[in-house]
Image (cartoon, rainbow, N blue to C red):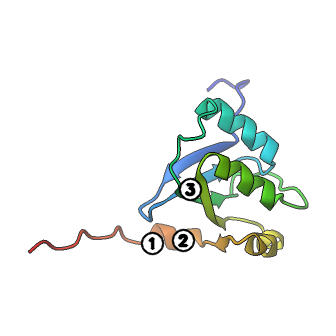
Amino acid sequence: MSASAPARSIEFHNTTLGATIAVLQAAEPSTLADSLHKMLGGMPDFFSGELLILDFGGVAQLPERIDWSGLQSLLRRYRLQPIGVMRLAAEHHEGARRAGLALVDPAQLAARPPAEAPARH
């Protein structure tokens, strides 16, 4: 990537938990909407009801108040189901909880071993 190329404001990573992690570089719904449109070409069916954890660790400066309703509405348009947040500053925890999002500890995600396949008889 050249120094002048803009960074993506959102990237997706799969986990062994059956949820996708959205690593955010911005928290404003309008900025994320632009990135999602560029990444997915406006295809609202790209995701299929996948569970999503929002990772705020890459956001350099969070707004004073996060627009939880706007974020959830945007993500649901792309058929994503936000279920939790991680690496979010403590002053935003209550707002996330009120929005119905769980606080996820990234250390527990990394420490969790992959699920074993059921034994066949």
> What kind of element bears circle 1?
helix
Q: The residue under label 1 is which amino acid type?
A: Ala
Q: Position of residue 115 (x, y in %)?
A: 33, 70
**Residue 86 position in % (x across, y down):** 65, 66
Q: Residue at x 59, y 53 (%)?
A: 80
**The N terminus lies in quadrant:** top right
Question: Which of pointers 2 and 3 indicates the residue nearer the eye?
Answer: 3
* Amino acid type at image mark 2: Ala
> Which residue type carries mark 3?
Ile
Residue annotated with mark 3: 21
Sequence-wise, which precedes: disc 3 or disc 1? 3
SS for dot 2: helix
Q: Residue at x 78, y 51 (%)?
A: 27
Above or below, 68 relative to 118: above
Tell me the tag on residue 107.
2
Q: Position of residue 85 (x, y in %)?
A: 66, 65
- If the image is split into quadrants, where does the C terminus sit? bottom left
23 sits to left or right of 65: left
Q: Are marks 2 and 3 in contact (CB under 8 Å)?
A: no
Instruction: Choose the circle earlier in sequence order: 2 or 3.
Output: 3
Q: Position of residue 29 (x, y in %)?
A: 79, 47
User: In the rendering, which numbered label is found on residue 69?
Assistant: none
**Label 3: how many residues lie within 10 Å, few (<14), some (14-19) or many (20+)?**
many
